[in-house]
Amino acid sequence: MDQESIVYGCIKDISPSALESERIRVNREAMLSLPHADEWPFLSQEMFSIPGVSAPFFNYQTEVMHFGASYKAVEYEWDQWIAQFESLLSKMYWVSATVHLETELSGTHTFTWEANGSFHKPGSGNMRVRCEWSHEGSLGI
């Protein structure tokens, strides 16, 4: 039987005011620059809820861009997935990002990125990442 991995999470930014609408435009362009799912990338446009430009100010204080996908045993190529995700983050405005990796054999891993300073600006400084692991249930042996 194939090992399924589920990856989901969100990227959080401050909700932009009318004067800062460029944040949504930049983040939207970064996600639209991703390849389509039929090209088999680790990250694709289809897995993201890409913010619209017509109603950009409906969030209260936090702009939330969520994503999710199902993979065949992506944990064996996780370094490549992380590299692509961090490349995307480097092109975006954000405050924090969280990725959950659910695997059948290795349990659940939660990765959290935090901006150095009050927010990350595209092309700026380093990101801090933290990983937590938990495993629930049995192996079904």
Image: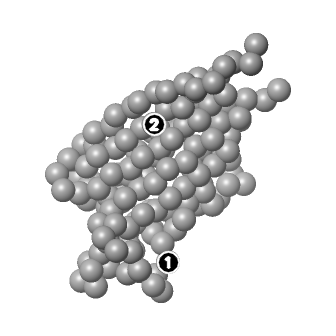
Q: Which residue lies furthest to the right in this view?
A: 1
Circle 2 — which element? strand
| Drawn side of residue 47 relative to residue 9, left or right | right
Checking the image for residue 110, the label placed there is 2
Of the image marks 1 and 2, the number of the one nearer the N terminus: 1
The amino acid beneath tag 1 is Gly
**What residue is at 37 percent from the left and 59 percent from the top?**
12
Q: Coloured how?
A: one colour
Rendered residue at 34%/66% (across/down) = 62
Going by the picture, which residue comes out furthest to the top?
141
Residue under numbered circle 1: 52
Q: Where is residue 117 in the image (x, y as percent from the top left)?
A: 16, 51
Question: How many residues crowd around disc 2 within 10 Å: few (fewer than 14), some, or many (20 or more)?
Answer: some
Q: Above or below — where is 72 with respect to 1?
A: below
Q: Distance between the residues labelled 1 and 2?
A: 28 Å
Q: In which quarter of the image is residue 30?
A: bottom left
Q: Would you say residue 43 is visible in this rendering?
A: yes
**Disc number placed over residue 1 in the picture, else none:** none
Q: Quick one: 69 or 86, which is closer to the camera? A: 69
Residue found 41% across the figure and 80% down from its top: 58
Disc 2 marks a residue whose amino acid type is Thr
- Check the picture and name the quadrant holding the C terminus: top right
